[in-house]
Amino acid sequence: MSAQKFAPGDLVRVRDDYPPGHVRTPVYVRGKIGRVTRHFGAFGNPELLAYRLTGPAEELYEVRFLQSDLWDDYQGSERDCVDLDLYRNWLEKI
Amino acid sequence: MPHDHHDHDHPAHSPPQPDDKVHSYYQILGVALKELLIEKGIVTADEVRSAIEKRDQITPAHGAAVVARAWSDAGFRTRLLTDANAAVAELGYPMTTTRLVAVENTADVHNVVVCTLCSCYPRELLGLPPAWYKSRAYRARIVHEPRAVLAEFGTQLLEETEVRVHDSTADMRFLVVPRRPAGTESLDEAALAELVSRDSMIGVAVVRQP
C-alpha cells in the first residue's frame, strides 16, 4: 500500500485524469489545488466497490477549494469555498 | 383548445392517475430488479414495503430535534460537532449506514450542502430529500454561484460572510446546524425545534425569529 498520508493544512492537487468507471471525484475539481481540512479515516474504494471488487480501503480526506481557484468568473467573498470528500488515490502532494 | 372540443373520450375531470404515466427506463429497471429479488426469494414483498414505510416515517422533525438540543445543551453541541453519529443516536435517531458530519453556521460562516454527483443526503435523519435537491440545476449551480442560488431561496448573506458549500462526494452526510435566532432565549427545546426547517438544515435557508 502506498501510504502517502496527508495532514490538515497540506496543499494538494487533484489528479487531472479521466478514467472510466464509478469515480467519485467531480470533474470540476480535477487538476485543481485545494487544502486538506480533515482526515476521515479509511473507507471502501467506490471505484472497486461499484464492480464488487475487493481491495485496500482508501484514506478519505476533506479538501477545501477556494471558489476563486475553481471558477474564473466567481462572484462573492474571496473566502467562499467548496469542501469535497476525496480519496487519497486522487490527491497529489504539492 | 377549448375544453369541450376534446376529440378523445375520458371521464370529465377525473383526477390524474399515477399509473397512467409512462415509466422511464430506470423505473422499469427498478421494478424488474425488485421482482427478480422477490422471485428468487432474496427478499419478500413485505420486507420491501416495510423498508419503504420505515423510511417514509423519517421526517425533518428528527433533525430539528437534534438542532434544538444543540442550541440548548452546550455539551451535546460539542458532541454533535465531533461525533455526530453518536450524538444523534443519543436522541434515538441511529444512523447506521453512513457517517454524519454536523457543520455549524456562525456569524462568519454559512454552510450549504449539495451532492453534485447524485443525491446523497442524510436520509436516515431527515428523510427523503426535496425534489429540487436532486435537480441538475441546483447541483450544478450551488457550487458555482451559491450566492445567487441562496438569494433565489430568499437567503441574502452579507458579502463578508464565508459561504462554504459541502459537496457530498463520498461516505459523509452533512447536517447544517443553523444559527439560533435572537429573541428565542425563553423558548424550550420543543418550541425551538418547531422553528427549524428542513431547508435550514440543508443550508439554503436561515431560521427566522418567531
Image: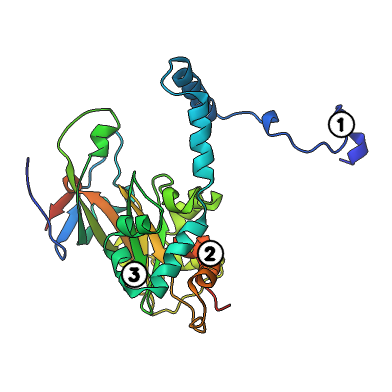
**Residue wearing tag 1:** B11
Work out whether mark 3 precedes mark 2 in sequence or the reverse, and give the earlier one.
Answer: 3
Q: Residue B90, relative to residue A48: is it above or below?
A: below
Left/right placement of residue B191 relative to residue B101 reads right
Which picture quadrant has residue A49? top left
The residue shown at (54%, 52%) is: B132
Q: Chain of mark 3?
A: B
The amino acid beneath tag 3 is Arg
**Alpha carbon distance from label 1 to label 3:** 57 Å
The image shows residue A21 at horizontal and vertical percentages of 29, 33
The quarter of the rendered structure image containing the C terminus of chain B is bottom right
Left/right placement of residue B173 relative to residue B65 reads left
The residue shown at (43%, 53%) is: B125
Q: Residue A40, relative to residue B209: is it above or below?
A: above
B49 or B115, which lies in front?
B49
Whether residue B145 appears in this view of the structure is no
The residue shown at (35%, 62%) is: B102
The amino acid beneath tag 2 is Ser
Which mark is in front, 1 or 3?
3
